[in-house]
Image (tube, helix red, strand yellow):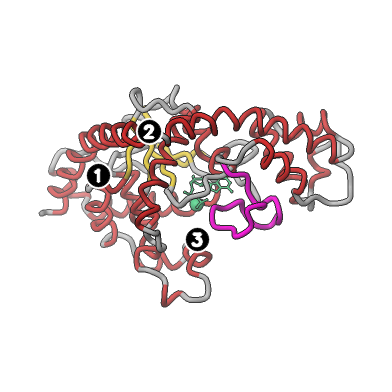
Amino acid sequence: GFHQRVFSGVQPTGNLHLGNYLGAIKRFVELQNHYECIYCVVDLHAITVWQEPKDLSRATREVTAAFIAAGIDPRAHIVFNQSQVAEHAELAWVFNCVARMGWLNRMTQFKEKAGKHKENASVGLFAYPNLMAADVLAYKATHVPVGEDQKQHLELARDIAQKFNMDYAERIAELGHGEQFFPLTEPLIAGPAKRVMSLRDGQKKMSKSDPSDYSRINLMDDADTISLKIRKAKTDPEPLPGEVAGLEGRPEAANLVGIYAGLADTDEQAVLAEFAGPFSRFKQALADLSVEKLSPITAEMRRLTAEPDQIDAILADGAERARAIARPILDDVKDVVGF
Ligand code: ADP
Ligand code: NA
């Protein structure tokens, strides 16, 4: 068996939002009690699309601050940024040679992000899932908490691990690694807010790159901005139903109820039991709850980002401890491959 270990990452691409918090960071915090956790600011992933160099390190510090402000303990666990640990890129190259073009051609996120101009997308954007597999497997992580949007990439990481284990089976056994060199990592996708949608369009996920700032609640928004965005959030003319079945075909209503449930650590049915009826009352309660849960995190993020040296010291320490785990695994990979 493999040591129970969690790995996950968030890109430093600006505008950290409520979807990142409920779908990822809040879960990262909860998992600390049950696993050894490694949380990474994935700056190598960020540059698969253009990032302004002068903004990148600021965004890296901002994600780090969000991790810590939300309650991740960088001493008990590991927090670092990807570009400081070269083992990620090193293993990704091996995986570029394990993964098949056909597998990557099926990735829906590439199709969405590359849009109509696939010929113009970076090779890195296409190979992104191989780097993600390397992120996880450089630590032989057994569990990865992610939002639903990343499920397909996690399945690809399992396919890569399995093909590596099979292609090199003889060598892996010879070198005394048993039957499986890499674990088949499990996704941890749970909770009512595994897919938070845009506040302006219930068909689109809440995203950093949405041009409308009213589509998302940013972790750096102040209380008035949060309240205003929730007041303006799109709904439909019907009141909130008393039962979850009544949310069928009402994506905007379902989204707001899911957000409430995620923030309150409850389920949609409990929320509807309390708020069936006009939206105005529910929206007021949702705004109050959002401010109550997010404003301490925002305040702590502001305090931390004002001390960049302290954040850099945390990242440097985390990188050193991450490398101490990944380097021996990469040395074994090199033996297996025959380098
Ligand atoms: P984004 O998708 O906003 O660019 P990242 O790719 O850095 O953000 O994702 C960081 C984490 O946040 C991932 O685990 C992802 O699944 C999660 N996540 C991103 N958007 C959402 C959302 N709208 N709802 C739930 N989880 C999300
Ligand atoms: Na994403």
Q: Is residue 1 visible?
A: no
Q: Which residue is mark 3?
A: 109
Q: For residue 307, which numbered disc appears in the image?
A: 2
Q: How many angstroms separate mark 2 from mark 3 (CA)? A: 35 Å
Q: Is residue 105 visible?
A: yes
Residue 200 among magenta residues: yes
Provide the residue designation for mark 1. 85
> Within 10 angstroms of label 3, few (less than 14), some, or many (20 or more) residues?
some
Mark 1 / mark 2, whichever is N-terminal: 1
In this image, 33 relative to 223: left or right? left
Q: Secondary structure at mark 3?
A: helix
Q: Residue at x 66, y 35 (%)?
A: 223
Residue type at mark 3?
Answer: Gln
In-image side of 252 versus 149 (left or right): right
At a point 76% along the width and 29% down the height, the residue shown is 270
Tell me which segment is drawn in magenta. 198-218
Q: Quadrant of residue 52?
A: bottom left
Residue 103 image point, x, y percent: 41, 63
Residue 182, percent across and down?
Answer: 29, 43
Which residue is more in the foreground, 226 or 19? 226
Taking 248 as reference, is 318 above or below it? above
